[in-house]
Image (cartoon, helix red, strand yellow):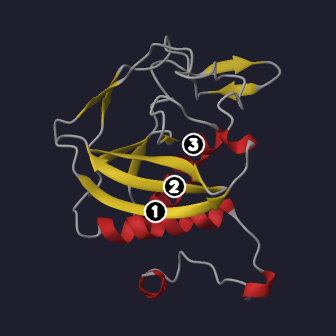
Amino acid sequence: MALIILLIMPGCLRKEAPLERQVFSLVEKNYLAADVLGHQLANHDLGKRPVLAASFVSLDDLDLSSPLGRVLPHQIASRLVSCYGLNFIDIRTGKSSLRMDMEQGELILSRDPELLSRDVQAYAVLTGTYSVVYNQVYVNARIIRSMDHSVLASFDYILPYNRLALDPGGSPDQAGPGGGSDFEPNVLAGF
């Protein structure tokens, strides 16, 4: 399947180094996942319908994410936007969330429930799970249609295990399982 994608999207794919010089790249693995998802989505007319990216979660505890779980959807969404024209929306830019900070600069992204909009119009959601088995991280990325929960595209891949990348407390804004917030946005599927 990767060969088919190479032929279809030559402008979006990079030329790879010979095998003996290849080094693991999280971005490249996630871009490959995005290319497979993008190819599968060609069968579905998403047009400019909004898609939401959600953190990937542990398969063993669907309320638990990690630094890896937060990075995966951003890299995949970035590729889907730039190479496949998908229209991703970011719920972290809510109502009046632009803030000025003398030390940090102009900030617009937030996880503060008071600044975020509770209702989100999304036709589909990019989400996924990960699980550690035999010292490797097995990832399932999928795009799910909001109105009927149908899986429009799905791809499984393996990443090398890194304990720190999977530590739920790996970010100062994370208060352990559950994230320390009871804010739950509503994904509206009126499309």
Q: Is residue 21 left or right of residue 14?
A: right
Q: Residues within 10 Å of mark 2 (few under 14, many from 20)?
A: many
Tell whether label 3 touches label 1 (CB within 8 Å). Answer: no
Labels 1 and 2: the sequence-earlier one? 2
| Labels 3 and 2: the sequence-earlier one | 3
In percent of width and height, residue 25 lies at 70, 65
Which of the image's four quarters has the N terminus?
A: bottom left
Task: Give the label, 1 or 3, closer to the camera.
Answer: 1
Residue at 55%, 65% (x, y): give it.
31
Numbered badge on residue 156: 1
Q: Which residue is mark 2?
A: 139
Q: Residue at x 63, y 57 (%)?
A: 134
For the point 45% across and 55% down, the residue is: 140
Label 1 with label 2: CB-CB less than 8 Å: yes
Q: Is residue 86 left or right of residue 31?
A: left
In this rendering, the answer to whether 165 lies above or below 184 is below
* Coordinates of residue 80 in the picture (x, y in percent): 45, 60
Mark 3 sits on what residue?
69
| N-term-proximal mark, 1 vs 3 | 3
- Measuring from the top left, give residue 19's x and y in whole percent: 73, 86
Q: In this rendering, is residue 63 above or below 151?
A: above
Q: Quadrant of residue 86?
A: bottom left
Residue 138, by quadrant, is bottom right
